[in-house]
Image (tube, rainbow, N blue to C red):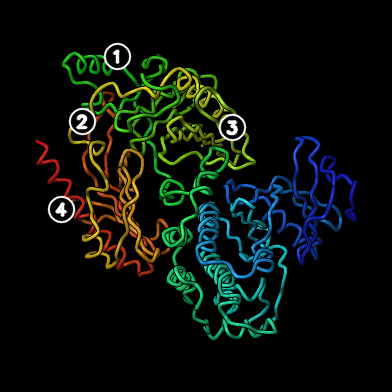
Amino acid sequence: MTPEAGIKVAGRYLLQETIGKGGMGVVWRAWDERLERQVAVKFAHPDDDRSTQQLMKEARNAGRLHHANIVGVFDYDHDADTCWIVMEYVPAQSLAQIVHERGLLPPQEAGAIGSQIAAALAKSHSAGVVHGDVTPENILVTDEGIARLTDFGISRALWSEATRTTTGVVRGKPRYLAPELVRGKRGDEKSDVFSLGATLYAAVEGQSPYGQAEHPMAYVARAIEGHLEPAVRAGLLTGPLATLLKLEPRNRPDATGAYELLTRAAPPPPEITAKLNDGRTLPIGPLLSVTRRLPRVVRRRRRALAITSGALVAAAAIAAAGLHPWTAGEDSRTYTDGAKPSATAGAGRAGTIGDAATAAPCGLLDAASLSRFGETRLDPAYGEFNRCDVVVETRNGDELADLELAFDKAPAQFGGDVPTRRVGNVTVGSYARDGDECERHIATADHEQVVIVAKRRAAGAPEPCELADAGTDVAVGVLDRGAVPRRSSPVAAASLARRDACSLLDASAIEKAAGVETQHPERGFGNWQCGWSSSTGDAGVDVLFNRDNELSDNGKPARVAGRKSYVSPGESGDDSCVVRTPHRTYTTAVGDDIVEFVELTVSAPQSAGRLCDTAKKLSATVVQNLAEQLSESK
């Protein structure tokens, strides 16, 4: 197909005018007749079937990303010799155009753009997608100052430049490529970070960090040699750029670290932050709950014990004795259909979560209302304290699906391509199904969110988005009538739910054990998670309170402060080590064993042995501080 104005693509996208052109193809502004909206349609001509398949794969990857600083991908199609990618239409100029027309940018403005793009990369990398071509041409900036990263994941399939070297063919623009790429290594997240640094360097210095050259091979040669020009106009960006442009990938921060460095040096102006926080798009703020949420191994959920008449008698005896469920472990109750009353709203402003310490996530779920999907039961004691699950099972007790509901202190993350609906004081965002999972986010009236995730666990499981919608309807119904319900009784005195994760370590303890200076900690919901980052952004420590049935399948055993703990190097990335140390174990009224534990993660460009030694030392400090706090509270 030869694109021209008036042609309709895929039976719905009416081409109107060209808005961009480059080595990767021509971009048209078009009208989506089905959804009645402006879109951008990029036409490209892959060399062969393999390139076509790769482009389709990358378009799918990009389509999974929903972020205010990423230009969303809506659709993809192809015919015999042409591929077209339908993207969000963003009326903006590229950073390259801005610098060409206005001249070099002030460091403050460049840093504010960079921090937004780093947030976009952090989101993408957390989803396993590497951009591969972060350049001034692929960064769009609106008149309002909102920065958007485009061609996400597509660049690797349709490189705009190719340079042949002694190590092979270098794909991409040599002026911004990381040294490891020109040496023949595969690009990864750290390569994106270097390219971001090179892009910002060019915006303030007027040239590549490799200097000025007339031929691409000159840039390649300087990259191989490790030749970088010092910044002379970067001002407040001098330090951050030097860190992003480290020659060795292991010495660079990840995208979250880059975001933190740039935001500290050059935070976006309040008017930009306000626009990103106004409920239509993602917030620019602490990334703890978005990008520092630690990847967790899939743990075995022990099958709930049958609720026998004896167990019910025992439960009644506990209640009669005045031992309220939270005191004995309400967080660990297992309800059957009808054993828990229908979800009812709490006192307070409708649509709010309220005090984290008393907010009951299980108050937004009702297992009985989901019984059409299978045998259902409520599981209030699996994972973090801000979480509650409904488990869908067969009649034999085999798990089919899981509906997880969790509170998150970060504002909701809605991009322009995420369908939303307003119900009372809350806004619901519905994300597209991603494999066996489907997510719904509820933006609350107190600027936090409820995250609902439905997961297929086995063949015959319900369609995850149908399960997610059903659970969301229950939660929204409760929030429309009032605030999140409160926990019915106090938390057990010894529970980690009563502790503040940030109080268990301080900067001096972290510096002594890990050898890094840290910034102010970032707190998670309920203070049940805390993260510290190094001033350079390439190291960090996270403490998380968690629960499970047992820990034996979560790493190698080790003694930490006299307790049998479990050490797992590389679990949260190559440069990481996780240590899980039990805090207390208790048995629920129906006989289910629950372990509360501290999950501590250290990340830094160090050997696994050193990282795990540091993690064990810090875990020992946490155990000691917990013991002191419990002793003082008696």
Q: Report the disc number at residue 562.
A: 4
Q: Residue at label 2?
A: 492
Q: Residues within 10 Å of mark 3 (few under 14, many from 20)?
A: many
Q: Residue at label 3?
A: 465
Q: Amino acid at mark 4?
A: Gly
* In this rendering, the label closer to the viewer, 2 or 1: 2
The answer to whether 468 is drawn above or below residue 554 in the figure is above
Residue 327: % across, % down:
21, 26
Looking at this view, is 397 or 542 the one in front? 542
Circle 1/circle 4 CB separation < 8 Å: no
Residue 404: % across, % down:
45, 33
> How far apart in space, not on screen, are marks 3 and 4 (Cα)?
46 Å
Query: Mark 3 or mark 1, which has the lower sequence index?
Result: 1
Q: Quadrant of the C terminus?
A: top left
Q: Could you tell me which residue is drawn at 48 percent across and 31 percent down?
A: 403
Looking at this view, is 470 or 455 the one in front? 470
